[in-house]
Image: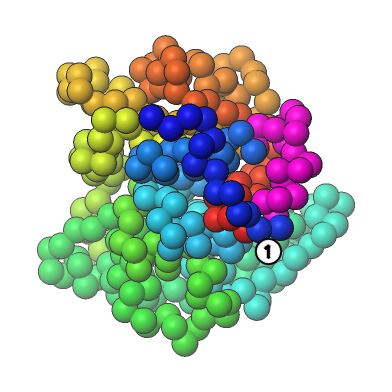
Amino acid sequence: MLKPHQSTIMTKGPVSQFIEHHYRHFNAASLIDAAKAYEDQLALGNKMMITLAGAMSTAELGLSLAEMIRQDKVHIITCTGANLEEDVFNLVAHNHYKRIPNYRDLSPAEEKELLDQHFNRVTDTCIPEEEAMRRIEDHLFNAWKNADEKGERYLPHEYFYQILLSGELEDKYQIDPKDSWLLAAAKKNIPIIVPGWEDSTCGNFFASYCIEGKLSPSTMKSGIEYMMMLADWYQHNGGNNGVGFFQLGGGIAGDFPICVVPMLHQDLELDHIPCWSYFCQISDSTTSYGSYSGAVPNEKITWGKLEIDTPKFIIESDATIVAPLVFAWILGL
């Protein structure tokens, strides 16, 4: 068994050296402790899950996450429907995005002006509807329709994999494709879990086509089938130690997958299944009463998700700042 942090690479790049020298206390110390413990998990041969809440794709997390995927530092991803699609939006429409540094000062009338210009704002970044969302709609519809006509059914992310791997979007790329985390995941064919996919722009596209009678709802596999897929994957990849859980933000992206372990234990009565082997949450949701995203990790012990001795970390900060630093450490940058 490895001792804590024994797996730390001795030779690190300048970003990691800066972190090690300066990040000594409080949330900074939690960051480096969590990063070193993540390395320990990899050294033990444990698989790692990363969960993406919020708008991490629009924050261009792919700049660091894509390389984590390529280097086999992450083996499964759970994300919201927004994060799934917004990585592709950025891939094909990056040059048309608009950044608004003074977004806090916008009046309701100015927000309406953005809507009239077909810009949808995410904090300081506006996604261009015509260039991003509508640019991939036809490609997705064709994939959905093709499956529908053949009587085939796929999970939401599998349709994205199809259009990315077909090469049909390549002439539309506006960023270096190596910075798309979804494209990296598609090339590795790593599993992606997308609970509540219907709560997304492309989910709304699909629903509208079903309402119009152009598609059958059954062409899209469901969230229950995602849980079934995850249960099967965990049993085949948890080994004796379990799987590490690295959570960015809160919400359904974290809540949904972490429940697979108690389901396997309590509902399927599979006593040999290990709990999650590591837990870290990067969150600006401070500890609170009745808020799952603000719950401390020890609460998860009572739900059968974590063990008493599971390495547990909370980094109370902005994931757009913290996650790339943790990834930089793990990648040795």
User: Is residue 180 shown above or below 65?
Assistant: below
Q: Position of residue 44 (x, y in %)?
A: 38, 38
Looking at the image, residue 102 sits to the left or right of residue 145; the answer is right
Task: Please tell me which residue lies in front, 220 or 48.
Answer: 48
Q: Position of residue 308 (x, y in %)?
A: 44, 14
Magenta residues (range): 15-31
Looking at the image, residue 137 sits to the left or right of residue 262; the answer is right
- Work out whether residue 325 can be spotted: yes
Where is the C terminus found, in terms of image quarters?
Answer: bottom right
Looking at the image, residue 173 sits to the left or right of residue 219; the answer is right
Q: Secondary structure at mark 1?
A: strand
- Work out whether residue 141 can be spotted: no
User: Is residue 258 shown above or below 265?
Assistant: below
The three-letter code of the residue at mark 1 reads: Cys
Q: Main secondary structure of the magenta part?
A: helix
Q: Residue furthest bottom?
A: 171
Reply yes or no: does residue 20 show up in magenta. yes
Q: Residue furthest top?
A: 302
Q: Determine the image quadrant of residue 282.
A: top right
Q: Residue at 49%, 26% (x, y): give it.
A: 311
Q: Residue at 40%, 18% (x, y): give it.
A: 307
- The residue that label 1 is drawn on is 126
Q: Determine the image quadrant of residue 111.
A: bottom right
Mark 1 crowdedness (10 Å alpha carbons): few <14, some 14-19, many ≥20: some
Q: Determine the image quadrant of residue 304.
A: top left
Q: Position of residue 209 (x, y in %)?
A: 33, 63
Q: Position of residue 186 (x, y in %)?
A: 36, 65
Task: Please tell me which residue lies in front, 115 or 54.
Answer: 54
Count of numbered tags: 1
Q: Residue at 80%, 55% (x, y): give it.
A: 103
Reply yes or no: does residue 314 show up in magenta. no
User: Is residue 73 shown above or below 213?
Assistant: above
